[in-house]
Image (cartoon, grey):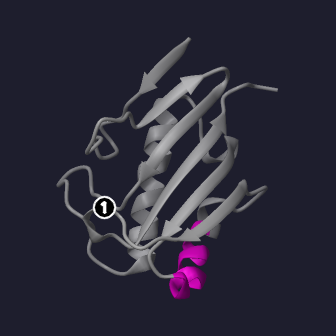
């Protein structure tokens, strides 16, 4: 059994996908990009501002599914320029201060709407 997760506090899907799907004690969050859900526009600023918005959006989706960043098991960070990695990583670290999840970071040739960063996540909702 699976449940579609949606939050109005994060941007709506811009294609045929769900913000997240909950199944078998896990939440699979689609990649979030730095869209302001109130305006539907990409946030102003550089990699730091974009990463901050992405993680706020991701937290909103996780919350709608009954989870938090403390329950994230794995993220994938997609960046168009890995030379910006240290600045993205500094913002990321503030959102995962203790026991950070496993992570892969990859450089891609492009992201939707010309953004600099996208992050997806898998979280556990099983209480131990």
Instruction: Name the one closer to the observer, 101 or 93.
Output: 101
The residue at 62%/53% (across/down) is 75
Look at the picture and state if 18 lies above or below 42: above
Measured as percent of width and height from the top left, residue 120 is found at: 52, 51
Furthest residue in direction bottom, as rendered: 83
From the top left corner, tell me how far across and down residue 18 is, in percent. Answer: 38, 33
Q: Write down the region rendered in magenta.
A: 82-92
* Image quarter (top left, top right, bottom left or bottom right) of the N terminus: top right
Location of residue 9 (image quadrant): top left
Q: Is residue 28 left or right of residue 46?
A: right
Q: Residue at x 41, y 51 (%)?
A: 57
Rendering coords of residue 31 (x, y %): 45, 50
* Above or below, 49 relative to 86: above
Q: Is residue 105 magenta?
A: no
Depth check, front residue: 75 or 109: 109
- Magenta segment, principal secondary structure? helix
Q: Is residue 37 above or below residue 89?
A: above
Where residue 22 sits, quadrant-wise, is: top right
Q: Which residue is mark 1?
A: 112
Q: Decide: few, some or many residues near mark 1? Use Cα within 10 Å; few <14, some 14-19, many ≥20.
A: few
Q: Considering depth in this image, is 39 or 104 the residue closer to the camera? A: 104
Q: Quadrant of the C terminus?
A: top right
Residue 63 lies, in percent from the top left, at 50, 36
- Residue extending farthest to the right is 128
């Amino acid at each position: 059994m699976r449940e579609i997760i949606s939050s109005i506090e994060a941007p709506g899907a811009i294609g045929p996908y769900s913000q997240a799907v909950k199944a078998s004690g896990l939440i699979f969050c689609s990649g979030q990009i730095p869209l302001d859900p109130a305006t539907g526009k990409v946030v102003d600023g550089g990699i730091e501002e974009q990463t901050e918005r992405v993680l706020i959006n991701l937290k909103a989706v996780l919350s709608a599914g009954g989870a938090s960043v403390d329950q994230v098991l794995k993220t994938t960070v997609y960046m168009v320029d890995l030379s910006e990695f240290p600045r993205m990583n500094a913002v990321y670290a503030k959102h995962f201060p203790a026991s950070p999840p496993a992570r892969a970071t990859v450089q891609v040739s492009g992201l939707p709407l010309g953004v600099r960063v996208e992050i997806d996540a898998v979280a556990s909702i099983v209480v131990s």
